[in-house]
Image: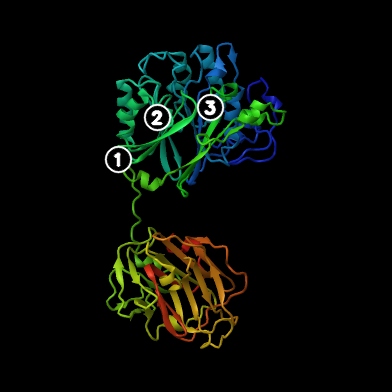
Amino acid sequence: MCTSHEHDQGEAAQAGAGRRNFLRATALMGAAATAAAALPAATAHAAPAESRAAGRRPDPGSRRFTLAVMPDTQYLFDGPSIDRAPVEASLCYLLEHGGDENIVFLSHLGDLTQNGAKEECAAIGEAFRLLDRQGVGYSVLAGNHDVRSSTDDQRGPTPYLDVFGPARFKGKRTFGGASPDGYNSFHLFEAGGRQWMVLALDWRLSAKGFAWAKDVLARHPRTPVVLTTHELVDGDDSLSSYGQTLWDQLIDGHDQIFLTLNGHYWPAARATRKNAADNDVHLHLTNYQNRYFGGAAMIRLYRFDLDRNTIDVETISPWILGRAAKELGELERQEIELSGGVDRFTVEIDFEKRFAGFAPVPARAERPVSRLLIPGTVAYWRFEQTVTGTVRDRSGRGNDLTLVSVGGGELGWSADHHPDQPGHGSLEFQGFKSPLKGACLRTVDGAPLNSTTFGKGYTIEAFYRLPADWDPSHHAWSGLVSRTGTGGAAGRTADDPDEPLATLSLSNDREPQWAMRPLNQQGIATNWGQETPLETWWHLAVVNDGEHTTLYVEGCPVVRNPKATSVGITSVGLPWLLGGYEYGGKIDQILHGRLGDVRIVERALPVKSFMNH
């Protein structure tokens, strides 16, 4: 069970309410037997309650994960004034929330103690046994108060090294290794489907220390690195003299280092600098020893979200949160969570772009046509060259396409494509509304698709991208895929009888819309998606299971999917269009943008079978 030292932590009971991203209204301390040790690895010798708590580990594939940071705790370990409770409360918090926060690692930023004395080091070393017993991943490093400040990493034996030297970490899953002197270390963890490194460096690096760090980076050339050290940033947009040395000799020339974390100075601050590769490096100072109770072992939570390309940062005091069940004093209430701009903020990083220089994401290979011809495929078109005549239906069903030019318009070709598109090419449509001009494609007369009504269901998929000059006044309501023939011609006169029988179009707000006349009703059934930004590739899928229709954008169902029963697609035997839209039986609008692979299947497909999977 994750229990803190015997000072007063037993007074704070854990409340039932959960806490994620914002303050928990009740106590969090004393993380009881359900504390999920979700950080890497589990010890084989844990007590039974601890073994149960260690049952969950981080999800290495999740694109959302958290790196925890603990800065200077020195005033809690100062000669006769030793109080482990705040540190243990923070560690218990990490154990308790390791699962729901997907906490992958903890980094201490040095100045664990005030004097580096044997008793002080032993006391905080005992506190960290809470993590050791659960086999969690963490790093520590020496600050100027943990060792003689006039020395570098060649200083030799110290009480700090006796407690936090390489022997403590040997065999841990995340421990990568240490410098021969023992004062520098590197740690590797899996998150977001890749490997990451924490490079934990001593208060002062010697020439040997710099050489060791460079060698570690050279041996892990594709691994993004968070560098932790005690001194680097000393104020907003400012580095200390030693911090400048670290920048010049190590950080600037190693593009892998994208984030640095340090303590030592206060108040908290941030800096951003361009490295030699012209990429941003985010440099953060976090230290609260000047605040109530020596900072009360506050922790920072760096919440990475690789899909949103953000790191959301929050600073909290689990020890004070744990005392919230009691009446708190004014100072305590102020320190529960820090909300200033240097304590709670968001860092925006396009991770793929930022890491491209040392770890480029390999482009997905083109997939052979045969892999796309799943059972039920009735049409599959991919565009591998400029259209000069007929575009062959790769399904073999005979639903070939021919070129239709309006006002002398032409079709272009581009190698540009959605990153998950099977074929590596797209057609460039150059439609314009007034006067109407452009070119589109239509199925040949007599194509089987022209009369298919899909009574048992269907899936229609398409990739598209709109250019920066897309203008709703000239380009709105163009069709990606549409079936010609009007509702009036089919005897379906409800709503507008001049509308085509089916169209997957883009509105004036660039919202995908599937509007069609099912076999089982007179009127038009409509599915709506949300606005899709320009200059971005999108995948759409319209799926009907024989009863209901669902529109998906990038594999996610949209909100405006009707609940009404919808069976099949009405037909009068006329062709389908790609890149064109008819109104009243005549082409009324032509796509302005790029269209990639298009596939039609006469059954409902699960998301995992879409072309972008």
In the rendered structure, find residue 601 and report the number of the disc placed on it.
Answer: none
Counting from the top left corner in percent of width and height, residue 427 is at: 33, 69
The Cα–Cα distance between marks 2 and 3, rounded to whole angstroms, is 36 Å
Q: Which mark is residue 238?
A: 2
Measured in 3D between alpha carbons, the distance from the residue under mark 2 to the one under mark 1, in whole angstroms, is 20 Å
- Camera-near label (2 vs 3) is 2
Q: Quadrant of the C terminus?
A: bottom left
> Percent x, y for residue 517?
55, 79
Residue pictured at 64% horizontal, 36% vertical: 34
Q: Which amino acid does label 3 sit on?
A: Asp
The amino acid pointed to by label 1 is Ala
Ranked by sequence position, the earlier of labels 1 and 3 is 3
Q: Residue at x 48, y 75 (%)?
A: 503
Q: Nearer the viewer, mark 2 or mark 1?
A: 2
Q: Which colour scheme is used?
A: rainbow
Name the kind of residue labelled 2 in the image: Ser
Return the x and y of residue 575 as percentages of the image width and height.
42, 82
Relative to 138, does residue 387 appear above or below in the rendering? below
User: In the rendered view, would you say 4 is above or below 35?
Assistant: above
Q: Would you say residue 40 is visible in this rendering?
A: no
Tell me, for residue 132, which label it has, or none: 3
- Residues 273 and 207: in front is 273
The residue lying toward the viewer, choosing from 537 and 343, is 343
Q: Residue at x 34, y 71 (%)?
A: 430
Tag 1 secondary structure: loop
Residue nearest the observer in this picture, 172 or 428 = 428
Residue placed under numbered mark 1 in the picture: 277
* Sequence-wise first label, 2 or 3: 3
